[in-house]
Image (cartoon, rainbow, N blue to C red):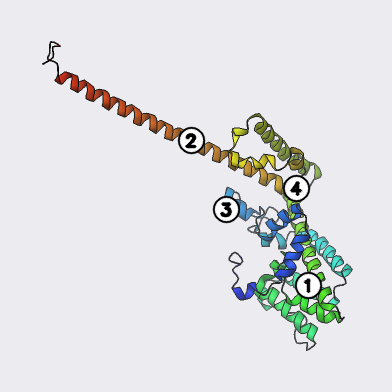
C-alpha cells in the first residue's frame, strides 16, 4: 500500500479475495515469478540503475527511463507487436471464460487508452451515462481502476471489486454470484499471464532477438551456477552455514532448469553470501590482531615494571642494597 501510494480507501477498492485465490492456484515456481512481477522486483533498468549503477534507459526504444510501467507501454514497434499478441491471447481467454462482451470491450478500451493516451486523466468509461445497473457497475469499475487504483495495477492482478459485481448483473442467473467469483479468479490469472508474456518478450529483446544469442547468455549463466556448486562441494566453508540452504534446498539439475531471472537472482544471492563470509573473516582477523597487540602491550608493560623493580634493589655492582 505504501509503495503504490494508496490511501486505505483505495486499498479497500481492490478485490483481494479473488487475488488471493488466483495466487494459490499457481505452482510455487509461478508464485515466485508472479510475486516479483506484482511487486515490481524484476530487473527493469530503473532498478538496475538504483542497485548496480547501470544505464536506466529503456534498451528497446532508447528514449525513456525503463520503469516497469514503461515496459508495459513501450512505444517501440517490436514491443507494440508483442503487446498486440498478448492482448489477443487475453481476449481469447476471456471469451473462452464466457466473459460478458461489454466487460471485454471496456477492458480493451481502457487498455488502448492507457497505452496510447497522452492525457489519461480525461479518459472516461465507454458505458458512462447509461442507467442500466450492469453498465453503472461497469462504469464504477472502470473509473476506480483508471483514476484511483491505477490501470497498470490491473495487469498486476489488482482489480476493482466492481468488475465482479458488473458480471453478476450481466450474468442474470440464479448462481451468478458464485460464477462471478470463479470468473474473477480466472480473470486475474489471465492478466498475470499477459504481464508474464510482456516481460518475457522484453527479456528476449534485451538479451538478444536471435535464439543463438539467448542460448549463449543462458549457457554462461548455467556455467556460473555449475562453478559455484563445484566450489561449494569442494569447500562448504565458502559461505556461512546459515546460507547453506542456497545449495541444499535444490539440486544442481533443478537450478539449471529454472527461468533466467531466477538463475541470475540465485547467483546474486550466493555472491552476497560470499561477501558476508569475507566480511566476517576480515572482522575476526581484525579482532584477533587487536587482541594480540593488547597482549603484547601488557607483556611489555610487565617486563618494564619488573626491570625497574630489579634496579631498585641492586646497586651498580650488582650487589643487593
Q: Considering only order in the chain, which callout, 1 or 2, is on the residue closer to the N terminus?
A: 1
Tell me the quarter of the picture where residue 109 sits.
Answer: bottom right
SS assignment at label 4: loop
Tell me the quarter of the picture where residue 150 sits.
Answer: bottom right
> Residue beneath label 3, please?
50
Residue nearer the viewer, 224 or 291: 291
Q: Is residue 93 visible?
A: yes
| Nearer mark to the viewer, of 3 and 4 | 4
> Residue beneath label 2, please?
282
> Residue beneath label 4, please?
259
> Residue beneath label 1, please?
107
Q: Considering only order in the chain, which callout, 4 or 2, is on the residue closer to the N terminus?
A: 4
Q: Marks 3 and 1, Cα distance to the nearest angstrom? A: 33 Å
| Nearer mark to the viewer, of 2 and 1 | 2
- Left-right relation of 304 to 236: left
Looking at the picture, how far across and down is residue 11, in whole percent?
64, 72
Mark 4 is surrounded, within 10 Å at the Cα level, by few (under 14), some (14 to 19) or many (20 or more) other residues, namely few
Amino acid at each position: 500500500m505504501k509503495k503504490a501510494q494508496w490511501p486505505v480507501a483505495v486499498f479497500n477498492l481492490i478485490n483481494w479475495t479473488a487475488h488471493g485465490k488466483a495466487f494459490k492456484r499457481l505452482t510455487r515456481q509461478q508464485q515466485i515469478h508472479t510475486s516479483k512481477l506484482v511487486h515490481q522486483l524484476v530487473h527493469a533498468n530503473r532498478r538496475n540503475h538504483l542497485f548496480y549503477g547501470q544505464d536506466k534507459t529503456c534498451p528497446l526504444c532508447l528514449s525513456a527511463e525503463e520503469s516497469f510501467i514503461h515496459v508495459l507501454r513501450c512505444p517501440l514497434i517490436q514491443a507494440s507487436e508483442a503487446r498486440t499478441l498478448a492482448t489477443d491471447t487475453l481476449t481469447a481467454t476471456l471469451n473462452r471464460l464466457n466473459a460478458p462482451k461489454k466487460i471485454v470491450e471496456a477492458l480493451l478500451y481502457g487498455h488502448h487508452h492507457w497505452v496510447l493516451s497522452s492525457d489519461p486523466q480525461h479518459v472516461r468509461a465507454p458505458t458512462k451515462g447509461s442507467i442500466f445497473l450492469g453498465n453503472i457497475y461497469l462504469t464504477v469499475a472502470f473509473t476506480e481502476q483508471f483514476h484511483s487504483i491505477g490501470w497498470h495495477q490491473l495487469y498486476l492482478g489488482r482489480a476493482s471489486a466492481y468488475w465482479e459485481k458488473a458480471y453478476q448483473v450481466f450474468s442474470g442467473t440464479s448462481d451468478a454470484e458464485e460464477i462471478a467469483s470463479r470468473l474473477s479468479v480466472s480473470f486475474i490469472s489471465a492478466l498475470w499471464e499477459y504481464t508474464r508474456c510482456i516481460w518475457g518478450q522484453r527479456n528476449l529483446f534485451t538479451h538478444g532477438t536471435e535464439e543463438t544469442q539467448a542460448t549463449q547468455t543462458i549457457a554462461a549463466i548455467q556455467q556460473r551456477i555449475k562453478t559455484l556448486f563445484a566450489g561449494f562441494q569442494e569447500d562448504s566453508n565458502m559461505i556461512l552455514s546459515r546460507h547453506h540452504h542456497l545449495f541444499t534446498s535444490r539440486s544442481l539439475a533443478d537450478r539449471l532448469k529454472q527461468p533466467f531471472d531466477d538463475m541470475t537472482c540465485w547467483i546474486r544471492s550466493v555472491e552476497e553470501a560470499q561477501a558476508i563470509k569475507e566480511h566476517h573473516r576480515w572482522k575476526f582477523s581484525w579482532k584477533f590482531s587487536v587482541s594480540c597487540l593488547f597482549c603484547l602491550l601488557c607483556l611489555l608493560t610487565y617486563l618494564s615494571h619488573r626491570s625497574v623493580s630489579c634496579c631498585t634493589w641492586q646497586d651498580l655492582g650488582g650487589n643487593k642494597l
